[in-house]
Image (cartoon, rainbow, N blue to C red):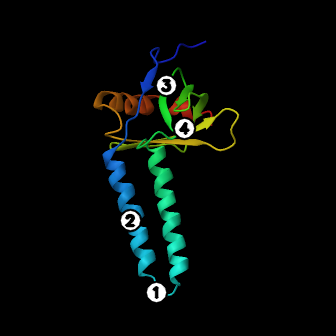
């Protein structure tokens, strides 16, 4: 039995990211501009699609933490190896494992998690301003160091 590389759990308490807010407003706003510029479709069809884009923006911003969505991840705790604990805003606590499809960049980390008892994975998008600088750095370092052991079993 080997001991884990990190005995201390890493606690992530993401806050809303202004950078991701700007990106989502730009993307959804661009989609609305394109829909309104299409002359081939009638106004009712374009209006329906604009409403769909606005609903998408509403749910996206809720998941990113701009309001208290009950399914938003409030706290994420990386315990040992690949054991994660998710605390949702509705008080529900879930256990999960990190999937190999997760993504890491100096400005952005996307954690794709396989939640026990759920068919679909959950994703948590963390921009650089979603966490304090030290916690974001610790997450990236730990993901880099443990990548082989995390994803070797997938």
Element under disc 4: loop
Q: Please tell me which residue lies in front, 10 or 105.
A: 10
Q: Please tell me which residue lies in front, 109 or 54.
A: 54
**Residue at numbered disc 3:** 77
Of the numbered discs 4 and 3, the one sitting upstream in the chain is 4
Q: Quadrant of the C terminus?
A: top right
**Residue at numbered disc 1:** 39
Position above or below: 20 against 77: below
**Dot 2 alpha-carbon crowd within 10 angstroms: few under 14, some 14 to 19, many 20 or more:** some
Residues at discs 4 and 2 in contact (Cβ within 8 Å): no
Q: Quadrant of the N terminus?
A: top right
Residue at the left extreme, as displayed = 133
**Residue at numbered disc 4:** 70
Disc on res. 29: 2
Q: Position of residue 32 (x, y in %)?
A: 42, 70
| Between marks 1 and 4 in the image, the one whose residue lies nearer the viewer | 4
Q: Residue at x 53, y 84 (%)?
A: 42
Element under disc 3: strand
Q: Position of residue 126 (x, y in %)?
A: 41, 40
| Between marks 3 and 1 in the image, the one whose residue lies nearer the viewer | 1
Q: Please tell me which residue lies in front, 66 or 10.
A: 66
**Disc 4 to disc 2, C-alpha distance:** 25 Å
């Amino acid at each position: 039995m080997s001991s884990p590389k990190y005995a201390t759990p890493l606690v992530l308490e993401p806050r809303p990211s202004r950078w991701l807010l700007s990106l989502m407003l730009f993307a959804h706003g661009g989609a609305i501009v394109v829909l309104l510029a299409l002359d081939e479709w009638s106004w009712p069809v374009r209006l329906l699609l604009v409403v769909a884009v606005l609903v998408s923006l509403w749910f996206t911003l809720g998941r990113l933490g701009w309001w208290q969505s009950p399914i938003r991840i409030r706290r994420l705790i990386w315990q040992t190896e690949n054991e994660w604990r998710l605390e949702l805003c509705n008080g529900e606590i879930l256990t999960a494992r990190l999937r190999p499809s997760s993504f890491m960049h100096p400005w952005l980390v996307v954690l794709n998690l396989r939640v026990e008892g759920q068919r679909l994975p959950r994703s948590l998008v963390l921009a650089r301003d979603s966490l304090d600088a030290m916690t974001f750095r610790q997450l990236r370092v730990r993901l880099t160091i443990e990548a082989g052991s995390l994803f070797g079993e997938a």
